[in-house]
Amino acid sequence: MGALVPELDQRVITGLLTTRLTRTKGRRLLLVHGKYAVNGPEEFSVPIGDGTRRKVRVAHTTSVLGLTDAWQAHLATEDADLLVVTTDVPGDRISLDLLGEMVRSQIIAVDEADIVKQLFGASDLDPRMRRDPWLWLPAALIDAEPDAAQGGWPQHGAVLTLDAAMRALVGVRLGLEGLFEGGASVDVDALLAWSRTPGGPERLAALPEAERRGITEWLAQSAGEAAPVLLRLALQGRGAEATALGVLASVMTGDTASADAAVALGSVFGRGSRPSELRAYARAVQGTLTRWIGEASGRGPQSEEALQRVVDVLHQADRLADDAHLTAALAGNPFLPSSFETRLRRLADALSKGPQAAQAAWEHVAEHQLASVLYSKQVELARMAVRLRRWLDTPEPAVSSVGQAVRTHVADWGWVDRALAQLWVGGGEAEPALAYRAVHDAVRRRRALLDEAFAAQLGPWVERATAAQPGGALLVEDVLRTIALPLTKVRPPLVLVLDGMSSAVAAQLGEELTGAGRWSELSGDGRRAAAVAMVPSVTVISRATLLCGRPVSGGESAEKEGFAAFWNQHRHTAVLFHKNEIPGPADQLLDPRLVAAIASDDVVGVVLNTIGESLDHGQRSTLADWSVSQVKYLTELLNSARGQGRPVVLVSDHGHVLDRTGAEVGPSTAEGVESARWRTGPEVGEGEVSLSGPRVLENGGRVTVPWSEEIRYTPRKSGYHGGAALAEMTVPVLVLAPSAELAPTEWSELPRETVQPSWWEAEATSLPVPIPVKPGKRAAKAKPKPRPQEGELFADDAVEVPAAAPPAEPAVLTLGQRILDTTIYKHQRKFVRKPPEHKVVAAVIDALDHAGGTLSLAAVAAAAIGSGGRTNTRPEGLVTVLTRLLNIEGYEVISLIDSRARVRLNRETLREQFELSEESV
């Protein structure tokens, strides 16, 4: 019988008394069938329901004599109250005198279910808790009851369900108390987090066998098929490895699954895990890691902690994979650091196979789950290499004039320089360094040919070029008159001179400023402007010339006087601020006088020296990647201008070249050295050109300057200016406005898509497929375009390309034209008031289709205007009318997205709504 006696502890006795004390009727002896725990306290108190407590003494005996002795000893105690005796003595052996003192005059059998009801304040229990396989649960709930100081078990009032009981038990036993708040359910995500907590898995392992098995089965039912794998790992003491092992389990999924990988994985997990469980576990872990990476993408301490958690788990997974010889099988895994390195190596191989292969490999790199949160620099570096690979695949560029060269440099070759600079700085530290270097060197050779060709055009041009006869180029002294002055008709501009800003830096700054949607770029001729610097291209000459509006050499005082005088000639007051006049007092970002000037109606100029100073004192890495925040005071000045509704002219005085020479290369030996990139000696060496004429303001109008970026005459610095390379002589000009409303008459917003060169982004994968025209229709013969005259901005000869082939027969229809030809469109058009002309609708559809489905609102407007048709509405209104034409039955074919700044076309829905066959699109 001894084996059947239940062991009782203080919690059971307390629960029993709480349910029985109301029936004692003054009796002080309670006999309970069972055995009191050896280490249980002999005395304690219990609540009796009215806010008071009753003192209890507990004893255990196995004989009738022991019962009598325990009772007599209790009576002899001065503060005797209630005696509880646990025993296995049969009730028929109890003496009559003891029966008279006993509660209910019998030995009480413990009903754990009643105790549980009392502990939870429940009216009843789920019937399943009274039968297999849940018979262990009531005792476990009694044993696990939280201390009274913690509030005990939650009070239910109604029936305590099995699920509620298990939630409460699992919360306490495994340390997951907060998990179920608000009715939440347990999932593998929560269990993975629990498996990584110190001591968490050990708490499960320490439970009695029946309870441990019951909790494991309930978690498997609640959290899914992946839970048993995780819990087995936890019970094996491998909870800290559980998430990392889930990454390894992905070898059971996808196209790379193999028998060898399955065998290797089995050795890692051991017996007991079915393939379906491992696959479910792998998917669950991937979902958890994806959520963690999402958290890591934010800001603040929580994101940093999430990123560190991700990094720790995935590096651990890589180590485990290496130990199990699974690294190769996991090469395609989207989470492992080793798989990211594999993707980079494949990219290196693809760079030599052509731009399409390189682009596909880069997309594979960018799809890695850690690409944005951990490897963003490597991904961007790889992207630059692929971009340059695409540029190498474009037709051989050519230089036909100085004006054409500087304009094309701003529009195209400066973007090449931007990518080159990043590749040169970061390529040596990246995984595919040799492949990057090969691309870099090939591009540098092509760029050097352009610099040489430019120098050949520059010599004759410098001899003749004047303000009256600019030779087809915009001169730096004409920037204020040609670009800044027209803006005053709407609002006086803020002229920000970024000393030494190259076309490469301008490309990045412009992309950032217009990409956020806060600034619109304006243009009078549909292109970003570019001017030609003075000779030599140094600050004291070119900046003074820019600010004074005439060729001049001078310092800050000359610039101030000349700036004010220029604007006074045009009936505007103006003020110019230099470096020491920009910062404000301790509690202000900008000097109050500068703030007041921007708030006034004066033309305001500000000179920012950050880029120029970085050439002299900056680190190599700081010169390859420029953001707005890196240019000191630029953010504050732009915000001030925006607040005052001012347009901004962001302009350079000259560009710069970076020092790319090796440590062993010293200065070039030459006579008449005046600066790093110009001299007065008569002899012209390789990589140099002699320039003379009215635009040369040093040495009586004649200097020798290098066109090769590899030449310098002075000790090493991070970068230089003063020479005749395209990057030095080109002056980029960006006109920015808080709104396109600030554009002067005949000016317009410059869509981002028209600013960046075509090779900068890969072509859309779903380009429109030409459709043969129905028989009987003839395509209109295109008129030949007249060749641009010298002096026209962005002449067609900017880049020499092979002559266009004659049109193929039969003629073809674009997607937009195909839509207009449908009966559905013709019917829909009848119900739209004042619809745009057919050519406008077709042009917008085709522009969106060619761009992959998404364009800025400005680009859509440009497509509409370029069609030659009338729209009779503003861009946003045009899109609204197009939605009435194309969004049949409420299906979203065309829509405004990104705070109504961009337009999206759903090509698949368009095809379905207008009943175009798959072949026809």
Image (cartoon, rainbow, N blue to C red):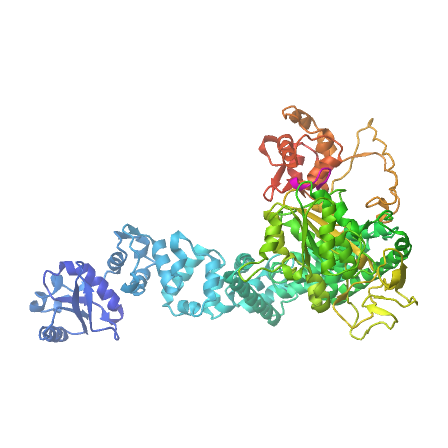
Residue at the extreme top? 830
Quarter of the figure with residue 875: top right
As displayed, is residue 212 above or below residue 876? below
Where in the figure is residue 648, as x and y percent of width and height?
67, 49
Range of the magenta residues? Answer: 741-748
- The number of numbered badges drawn on the structure is 0
Q: Magenta-highlighted stretch: main secondary structure?
A: loop
For residue 216, side relative to residue 291 (left or right): left
Question: Is residue 262 visible in this depiction of the protein?
Answer: yes
Residue under the image location 73 percent in, 68 percent down: 616
Horizontally, is 123 left or right of 329 in the view?
left
Q: Residue furthest right?
A: 683
User: Who is closer to the viewer here, 469 or 87?
Assistant: 469
| Residue 356 in view in this figure | no
Q: Residue at x 69, y 57 (%)?
A: 607
Quadrant that contains the N terminus: bottom left
Whole-percent x, y for residue 323 in the image = 60, 72
Q: Nearer the viewer, residue 296 or 857?
A: 857
In the image: residue 887, left or right of residue 90: right
Residue 331, how many percent across, how many down?
65, 63
Q: Which residue occupies the foreground of this view, 463 or 56?
A: 463
The answer to which image quadrant residue 723 occupies is bottom right
Q: In front: 23, or 301?
A: 301
Q: Quadrant of residue 211?
A: bottom left
Q: Position of residue 756 (x, y in %)?
A: 74, 49
Is 403 included in the stretch rendered in magenta? no
The quadrant of the rendering that contains the C terminus is top right
